[in-house]
Image: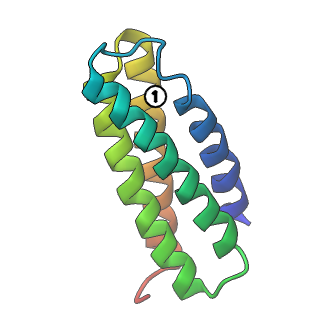
Amino acid sequence: MRVFSFTIVAAGLAAFALDVQAGTVDTAECRRDLIVMDSELSTAQAKLVKAQDSSRQEQCAVWREQITTFKKASALYKRCKTDTDRRVMSGQMDSQVNDFQSALTQMCKGR
């Protein structure tokens, strides 16, 4: 099922977010926001895993939450990461937004 691949990617992204020092804008605000985002990505991952056995309607709601979380992460990485980290991390988040949006369009019509 496609949800499984989302879970694997989300797990990798949460782990990737842990390295808040490399390529980071050196401000207290960015350091704090990156730590908070790591927690939010972990929570999103847990919700995604839990939703695998849920109804399609519940899965669709979780997928919408994923999109919101990934958009927020992308904006944060664009603000608080530099150079390659900024491009890679925000690009991964944007890709996840597109993947979940596609799943919503295909599988969540009217839900």
Q: Quadrant of the C terminus?
A: bottom left
| Left or right of 94 on screen, residue 46 | right
Q: Bin the neighbour count of mark 1 within 10 Å (Cα to Cα): few under 14, some 14-19, many 20 and up.
A: many
Q: Which residue position is annotated with label 1?
A: 89
**Residue at horizontal 46 percent and vertical 70 percent from the top:** 104
Q: On the image, which quarter does residue 12 sit in? A: top right
| Left or right of 68 on screen, residue 85 | right
Closest to the observer, 23 or 110: 23
**Residue at horizontal 50 percent and vertical 41 percent from the top:** 38
Point out residue 83 in the picture as x, y percentages from the top left corner. 36, 10
| Left or right of 42 on screen, residue 7 | right
Q: On the image, which quarter does residue 90 sit in? A: top left
Closest to the observer, 2 or 28: 28
Number of residue marks: 1
* Residue 5 against residue 75 in the figure, above or below: below
Closest to the observer, 109 or 32: 32
Point out residue 50 in the picture as x, y percentages from the top left corner. 68, 72
| Left or right of 59 on screen, residue 53 | right
Q: Give the colouring mode of the picture.
A: rainbow
**Residue at horizontal 43 percent and vertical 51 percent from the top:** 98
* Residue 44 against residue 36 in the figure, above or below: below
Point out residue 17 in the picture as x, y percentages from the top left corner. 52, 32
The amino acid type found where label 1 is placed reads: Met
Secondary structure, mark 1, is helix
Point out residue 109 in the picture as x, y percentages from the top left corner. 43, 83
**Residue at horizontal 46 percent and vertical 28 percent from the top:** 89
Q: Quadrant of the N terminus?
A: bottom right
Closest to the observer, 60 or 35: 35
